[in-house]
Amino acid sequence: MLIEEAKKQIEMIEEYIRKIESYEPTTMEQKAIYRYVQLESVTKVVKELNEEGYRIGKRKLNTVDISEVIKSKPKDDMHEMARKMYLRNKKRSFGIKW
C-alpha cells in the first residue's frame, strides 16, 4: 500500500468517527440509521430496536421496515452513509461485482 493510499484511508476513518460521535438520533428512523452504520446488520438493528420497545402500530419492527428506512431518500449525511453501506452490502451478498 502506498503512503498516500494509507493517508486517505486514515482520513476516511477519522471522518467516520467524527460523524458517529457527533450524531444524536432522536427518532426511531434516525436510531435505525445510526445503528446500521455501526452494526452493518439490519437483523441486529431490528433486534436492538425491538428490545427498546419500538413498534409500528402494535407490531414489532421487522427487517423490511428497517431496510425501507435505510433505502429511502437520504435526509442527512448519516442516512446517506447508511444507504451507501446497505447498497454495497446487498451487492456483495448477491455476488454482483460492479
Image (cartoon, rainbow, N blue to C red):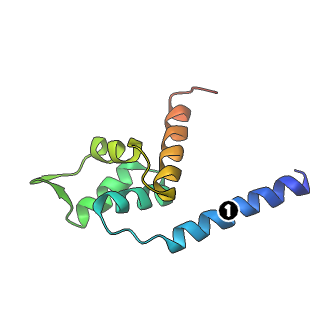
Name the residue at the left extreme: 58
State whether residue 31 is above or below residue 96. Answer: below
Task: Give x and y (percent) for residue 9.
Answer: 75, 57
Label tally: 1
Task: Give x and y (percent) for residue 2.
Answer: 90, 52
Task: Give x and y (percent) for residue 82.
Answer: 48, 51
Q: What residue is rendered at 61% in x and 63% in y? A: 16
Crowdedness near tag 1: few (<14), some (14–19) or many (≥20) residues, C-alpha within 10 Å: few
Task: Give x and y (percent) for residue 43.
Answer: 36, 49
Q: What residue is rendered at 53% in x and 46% in y? A: 85
Name the residue at the right extreme: 2
For disc 1, the marked residue is 13
Could you say which is closer to the camera, residue 64 or residue 43? 64
Q: What residue is rendered at 56% in x and 34% in y? A: 92
State whether residue 70 is above or below residue 24. Answer: above
Please state, as top left, top right, bottom left or bottom right, where the C terminus lies in the image. top right
Q: Amino acid at mark 1?
A: Ile
Q: Secondary structure at mark 1?
A: helix
Horizontal side of 61 relative to 76 (left or right) equals: left
Horizontal side of 72 relative to 39 (left or right) equals: left
